[in-house]
Image (spheres, rainbow, N blue to C red):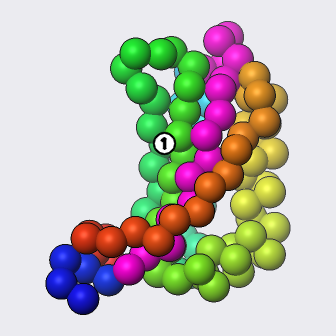
Amino acid sequence: MAGGAVKFVRIGQFQAREDSVEELCRIYSTEAIPEICAAGGNVGAFLFRPQQTANEFLAMTVWKTREDAEAYERSGQAKKMVDKIRHTFASAPVLSTYDAYGFDLG
């Protein structure tokens, strides 16, 4: 397929407690992203924070296949990562999944 292979993407959308934003960013950047990226089939993990709001986030993981993402979920690693930052959440994350076209991260 021109423009890169289809990838499977998971996006978690959530709000952080205002007093925990910096801690959330630090833990996700230094602990969660490296561990997620080391998982089989993962081609990227990202944390997005809009410039217009201080405590809203999107956490995105990109996988070669849906099966890779599901294997990561079954391994317990996803729960372990969420548990590391759960105390910073102001609300429960909402998870959405997507097929992504037009890029190739690996």
Q: Whole-percent x and y of residue 91?
A: 77, 28
What residue is drawn where x is 56% and y is 25%?
Answer: 56
Note whether 22 is above or below 49 in the view shown.
above
Identify which amino acid the numbered label 1 is placed on.
Leu
Quadrant for the C terminus, please.
Answer: bottom left
Dot 1 corresponds to which residue? 47
- What residue occupies the far top of the structure in this picture? 19
Instruction: Specify few, some or many for label 1: CA neighbours under 10 Å numbering under 14, 14-19, or 20 or more.
Output: some
- Which stretch did the figure color magenta? 6-21
103 in magenta: no
Rendering coords of residue 14 (x, y %): 65, 34
Q: Is residue 43 visible?
A: no
Q: Residue at x 63, y 85 (%)?
A: 67
Depicted 99 relative to depicted 47: above or below: below
Q: Position of residue 42 (x, y in %)?
A: 50, 73
Secondary structure beneath disc 1?
strand
In this image, 62 relative to 86: left or right?
Answer: left
Q: Nearer the viewer, residue 78 or 56?
A: 56
